[in-house]
Image: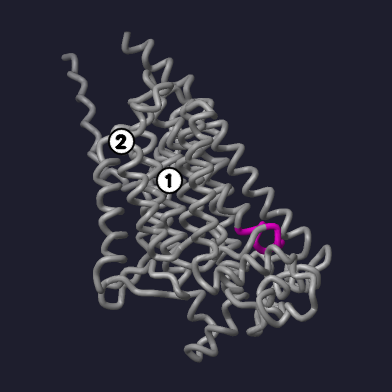
Amino acid sequence: MTSIPRSRPFPEARPQQQPSRGPAAIVAVKRIFAAETGNYFLLLGATLFLVVLGLVMVLSSSAVESYKASGDFFNGFVRQVLFAALGLPLMLVAARMPATFWKKWAGVFVIVAIGLQAAVILTPLGTSVGGNRNWITFGTFTAQPSELVKVALVLWLGLTLAKKLPVIDDWRELLIPLVPIVGVAIVLVLIGGDLGTTIILSLIVLGALFFAGVKLRYLAVPVVLGGIIGLVAAFGTSSRRDRMDAFISGCKSIDQAGGICYQTVQGWWALASGGPFGVGLGNSTAKWSWLPEADNDFIFAIIGEELGLIGAVVVLLLFVVIAIAMVRIIRANRDPFARITISAIMVWIIGQAFVNIGVVLGVLPVLGVPLPLISAGGSALITSMAAIGIVLSFARHAPASDAAGRELDA
């Protein structure tokens, strides 16, 4: 009798092993950055390096004044860390937004920003700092709406000028949308007394018009008018007249070193004492209440003093890297909105950086313009990082990948 072979029993079901959180987190991060381009990482890396360097230099340059004001050496540094902690996720979230998001909300952003700036001038919410009425206060929260105006304006200019490209050579087509919005934004900031921010806003507008293809002869008229208004505003108050007198005189007289040229001369001495290699991180003497605004407008002087010529050149090169990355992103995009918006942001970040450095070197009069991504100040840091996040959003996908995707869809 043939025995029937027994069937093999089914193997017992084994409980599936749960993947460890570590590899899963790594996979999630890889998915986030999988489609990013080299330009994306070039811009992101240079930005993060400047932010970290800024935190280090704010710690060094603000420690003495923080201790005098609050009894805590780290008060200013902790505040700047909190601002950076808010700016970083905002930058990364902005980098994930598609171009359609910015096109949809550009108009809303500019209305909100101008409304907040109007509240600074027209309501008791506005407060004055250093003689300029450019801060808004809600309880214990304070902010500079003029910094938000920069972000909103670059988006609105990019959207408006992209729509006007077919008639960009007709100046009458540009007057109606540009003059009311741009004029109100700049005038409100100028009324508040912030001449430095007014100049940066004017540079943003001119840069957007230039990269949109507006003829140079059309730009000559606003440049001349802006120059006249700027000169009138520069001599409008006694403090500004002193700054202009110091700039015109060149601060060559020893008698001016303790007067109208005090801040400029102290900045020069800080730079000169640094030499090629600097006096060492934390060893600045200018920050011991000698140099006003050492952690803000004149932080580049502290960088030159503590890190020397090498440190100052590294900062300059990092801004050059940011400019190169933005130019490459502009060239890789075909959307006029993206190209004009990125151009305006590039003029803002790079132009403001070189204005700040020019002030410290004495090439420009003292304007009260912070060094982007480095100087102390929450509004400037957060909005600058948000603006770079907008540029990153346009750099997320390589053109070749987009073309391949269109071919597959077809």
Looking at the picture, does residue 271 appear above or below residue 313? below
Q: In this view, does 224 lie above or below 187?
A: above
Taking the spot 47% from the left edge, 26% from the top edge, the residue there is 333
Residue type at mark 1: give it: Gly
Residue at 57% over, 41% down: 42
Residue 243: % across, % down: 61, 69
Quadrant containing the N terminus in the rendered view: top left
The amino acid type of the residue labelled 2 equals: Pro
Q: From the image, give the main secondary structure of the stretch colored magenta.
A: helix
Mark 2: give few (<14), some (14-19) or many (20+) Cα within 10 Å: some
Please say whether residue 362 is one of the residues in the magenta stretch.
Answer: yes
Point out the residue furthest to the top here. Answer: 410
Residue pictured at 75% horizontal, 68% vertical? 271
Q: For numbered disc 2, what is the local secondary structure?
A: helix
All told, the count of numbered labels is: 2
Q: Which of marks 2 and 1 is nearer the N terminus?
A: 2
Q: Mark 1 points at which residue?
A: 389
Quarter of the image that includes the C terminus: top left
Is residue 21 shown to the viewer in this render?
no
The numbered dot on residue 177 is 2
Check disc 1: other Cα within 10 Å, few if <14, some if 14-19, many if 20+: many
In the image, 13 versus 269, the foreground residue is 269
Pick the front one: 287 or 214: 214
Q: Quadrant of residue 253?
A: bottom right
188 in magenta = no
Image quarter of residue 179: top left
**Magenta highlight range:** 356-363
- In the picture provided, is 30 more to the left or to the right than 294? left
